């Protein structure tokens, strides 16, 4: 048994940032609480450096319950970078708020829970990570204490609590069937109750992923909470959820004779299709991005359905998650920069802020899967994984949905070239949008080298 705490150094550094930020917030005057953002940022940079070092070490299982491997390294890096961007985006909105320090601490706690969710190698650790990733997010949703935020937080909490209980019931059932909660100790289970355990466990993870039928909270929370928090809840929790789903599919579900693969494939189909259909006629950009994130969850579920059958499943999911994270944050950064939510409010943006429109086009067409943006490579890998894993029909469904999604993204781009645009934009958010668009293009252009490092020989 490996009991070296330094194996969890990135997680420990994030936790140190949380504690230091919380203590600093207790003593700093209200107008100086911006220092907590710097404390959290420094902790995240240190955690990213520790992740980079750990990536060159052999894989291991820490404390017989937490995997430190490629899946965990990618999740760590993606969550840390995304959280840094979120803290920058929230800093302007939270300025001079009497609870500004608490905002940064809650973001860090939810990010820590997301990382642990991705690395969990035991069902009990998975449940604990689910709670750590969820509870701070509920508080973030209602942080502004206005009517819309309170309603969003209540909906978020009630659905999360209900599906979390179902998930815990699934863990209990798995323990009763297999006699263990450790992934690596699971053997073949042929009981009819195993199918029920799979459904119950999926309930909680699909909630974090925003997949059907646990998706109802996504549009209401995205519209009701602040824009910065909406960017957080539609992006970062997905990272841990999908990596956790892939790990569970490979290490736990693979030993079950329950027909779980067709179930996941059907959920993927429903998620991408319903997300796209609901987004078609949205006039509110936040709700449009909310349904977009639901449809993206459908594409990300495709590699889960073929996990263990196709060698492309793991790199497809990891690359897509990273590409989606930076692209979705870029789109939300544009929303934060403009500060308005209706499609009509973006009229003439190309005249007043041409650089911001370019970033918006890159991010939105990137979400479609247009080359050379990063998600294009992710989608090609997803389609190839589905075909290679014996689910050619699912690849066809994903392609059809991708083509259909072009319509509602173009509805957002078109007004930008008509009329006169907003007089001013928020500079910090605009810079994040530029950075995200540039990184998306760089990831797409450099995908060959990255995938070669994932031992695909591409």
Image (tube, rainbow, N blue to C red):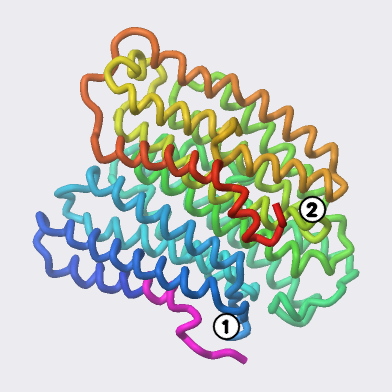
Q: Residues within 10 Å of mark 2 (few under 14, many from 20)?
A: many
| SS majority, magenta | helix
Image point (77%, 82%), residue name:
179
Provide the residue span drawn in magenta. 1-14
Q: Residues within 10 Å of mark 1 (few under 14, many from 20)?
A: many
- The one nearer the camera, 412 or 219, is 412
Asked if one can make out residue 259 in the rendered structure from this viewpoint, the answer is yes
**What residue does disc 2 label?**
306
Taking 358 as reference, is 377 left or right?
A: right
Q: Is 140 a magenta residue?
A: no
Q: Is 2 a magenta residue?
A: yes
Query: Percent from the top left, x then y, of residue 386?
Result: 79, 45
**Residue 374 occupies quadrant:** top right
Q: CA–CA distance between discs 2 and 1?
A: 27 Å
Provide the secondary structure element on which disc 2 rests. Answer: loop
- The one nearer the camera, 333 or 29, is 333
| N-terminal-most mark, 2 or 1 | 1
- The one nearer the camera, 268 or 44, is 44
**What residue does disc 1 label?**
62
Taking 144 as reference, is 7 left or right?
A: right
Taking 289 as reference, is 227 left or right?
A: left
* Residue 274 sits above or below residue 11 on the image: above
* Residue 382 sits above or below residue 192 on the image: above
Image point (29%, 49%), residue name:
88
Image point (33%, 22%), residue name:
354
């Amino acid at each position: 048994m490996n009991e070296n705490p330094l194996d969890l150094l990135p997680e420990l550094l994030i936790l140190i940032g949380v504690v230091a930020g919380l203590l600093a917030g207790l003593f700093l005057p209200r107008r100086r609480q911006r220092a907590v953002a710097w404390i959290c940022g420094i902790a995240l940079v240190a955690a990213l450096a520790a992740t980079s070092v750990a990536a060159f070490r052999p894989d291991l299982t820490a404390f017989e319950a937490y995997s430190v491997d490629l899946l965990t390294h990618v999740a760590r890096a993606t969550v840390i970078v995304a959280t840094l961007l979120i803290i920058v985006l929230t800093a302007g909105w939270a300025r001079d708020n009497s609870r500004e320090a608490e905002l940064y601490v809650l973001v860090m706690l939810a990010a820590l829970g997301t990382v642990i969710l991705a690395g969990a190698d035991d069902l009990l650790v998975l449940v604990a990570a689910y709670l750590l990733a969820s509870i701070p997010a509920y508080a973030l949703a209602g942080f502004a204490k206005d009517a819309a935020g309170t309603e969003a937080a209540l909906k978020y909490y009630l659905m999360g609590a209900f599906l979390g209980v179902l998930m815990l019931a699934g863990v209990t059932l798995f323990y009763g069937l297999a006699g263990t909660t450790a992934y690596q100790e699971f053997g073949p289970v042929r009981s009819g109750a195993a199918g029920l355990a799979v459904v119950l466990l999926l309930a909680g993870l699909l909630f974090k992923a925003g997949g059907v039928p646990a998706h109802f909270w996504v549009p209401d929370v995205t519209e009701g909470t602040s824009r910065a928090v909406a960017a957080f809840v539609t992006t970062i929790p997905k990272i841990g959820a999908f990596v956790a789903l892939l790990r569970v599919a490979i290490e736990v579900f693979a030993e079950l004779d329950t027909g779980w693969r067709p179930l996941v494939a059907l959920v993927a189909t429903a998620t991408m299709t319903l997300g796209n259909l609901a987004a078609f006629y949205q006039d509110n950009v936040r709700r449009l991005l909310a349904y977009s994130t639901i449809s993206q969850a459908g594409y990300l579920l495709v590699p889960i359905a073929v996990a263990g059958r196709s060698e492309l499943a793991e790199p497809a999911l990891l690359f897509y998650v990273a590409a989606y994270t930076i692209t979705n944050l870029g789109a939300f950064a544009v929303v934060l920069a403009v500060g308005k939510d209706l499609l009509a409010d973006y009229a003439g943006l190309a005249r007043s802020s041409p650089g911001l429109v370019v970033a918006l086009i890159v991010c939105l067409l990137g979400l479609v899967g247009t080359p050379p943006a990063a998600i294009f490579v992710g989608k090609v890998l997803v389609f190839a994984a589905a075909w290679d894993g014996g689910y050619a029909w699912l690849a066809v469904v994903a392609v059809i949905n991708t083509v259909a999604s072009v319509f509602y993204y173009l509805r957002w781009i078109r007004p930008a070239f008509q009329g006169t645009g907003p007089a001013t934009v928020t500079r910090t958010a605009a810079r994040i949008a530029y950075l995200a668009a540039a990184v998306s293009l760089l990831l797409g252009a450099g995908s060959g080298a990255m995938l070669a490092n994932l031992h695909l020989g591409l």
